[in-house]
Amino acid sequence: MGFGHCAVGLAAKPVAPKVPLGILLLATMMLDVLAIAFGWMGIEGAKAGIPWSHSLLMSVIWSVAAGLLCSRIYHNHRAGVVIGLLVFSHWVLDFISHPIPFSSFSWRSWQWSYGHPLAPDLPLLFSGSPKVGLGLYNSISAAQATALECGMLVLGAAVYVTYTRRKREKQQSAA
Ligand SMILES: [Zn+2]
């Protein structure tokens, strides 16, 4: 999925006008990109969990690193702060929604359920440290979760479209 994360990136455009939308979206998805990369490298996965990409500690470190990098690239302090917050917003949304019973998802019935709540999967520090997660997606159906994410995406897109339209109108009236 990830629509919810994309929604945050779209909605951030007005506060970081210098940063291309693709970079804003990438920032919101960065922890998942890292998780895929670490999965390929074999240091994260079903057994090892996601301590390097998704622990609270590492998420703060990735957020600060991405923020510093972008404030350099765009010579803009605010762009760096926004990027850092976007990277960290991924952890906040994951904290609310995880663990996600996606491996039990059925495309035929559009349902997921293990019949019992899953254990939290977001470590606080390193592997072996306590894991957290409010588990929203444990208690709502796959269809409800999809509706929620699509709703967020529509809201985020509305913010983005309103912003770009106003900007175009301003440019036209100035020309
Ligand atoms: Zn994630």
Image (tube, rainbow, N blue to C red):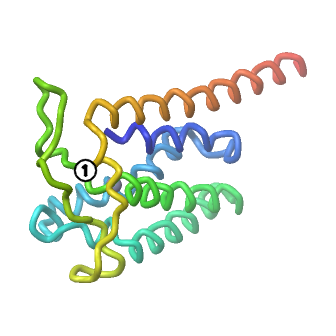
Q: What secondary structure is found at the residue carrying circle 1?
A: loop
Q: Residue 78 location in percent, x, y?
A: 71, 58
Pick the front one: 105 or 91: 105
Q: Residue 139 location in percent, x, y?
A: 29, 47
Left or right: 15, with 1 as reference point: right
At a point 55% along the width and 37% down the height, the residue shown is 10
Instruction: Examine the image and state in which quarter residue 171 appears.
Output: top right
Q: Examine the rendered structure and indicate whether residue 124 appears above or below residue 165.
A: below
At a point 70% along the width and 62% down the height, the residue shown is 77
Pick the front one: 96 or 71: 96
Left or right: 23, with 50 as reference point: right
Number of marks present in the image shown: 1
Q: Quarter of the image containing the C terminus?
A: top right
Residue that extends furthest to the right in the rendered view of this protein: 174
Instruction: Examine the image and state in which quarter residue 167 appears.
Output: top right
Q: Is mark 1 within 8 Å of ligand 1?
A: no
Q: Residues within 10 Å of mark 1 (few under 14, many from 20)?
A: many
**Residue on which the image places disc 1:** 100
Quarter, ligand 1: bottom left
Q: Examine the rendered structure and indicate whether residue 134 appears above or below residue 62.
A: above
Q: Residue 119 location in percent, x, y?
A: 21, 64
At a point 17% along the width and 60% down the height, the residue shown is 39
Q: Quarter of the image containing the N terminus?
A: top left
Instruction: Examine the image and state in which quarter residue 160 appears.
Output: top right
Q: Examine the rendered structure and indicate whether residue 78 appears above or below residue 152.
A: below
Q: Amino acid at mark 1?
A: Ile
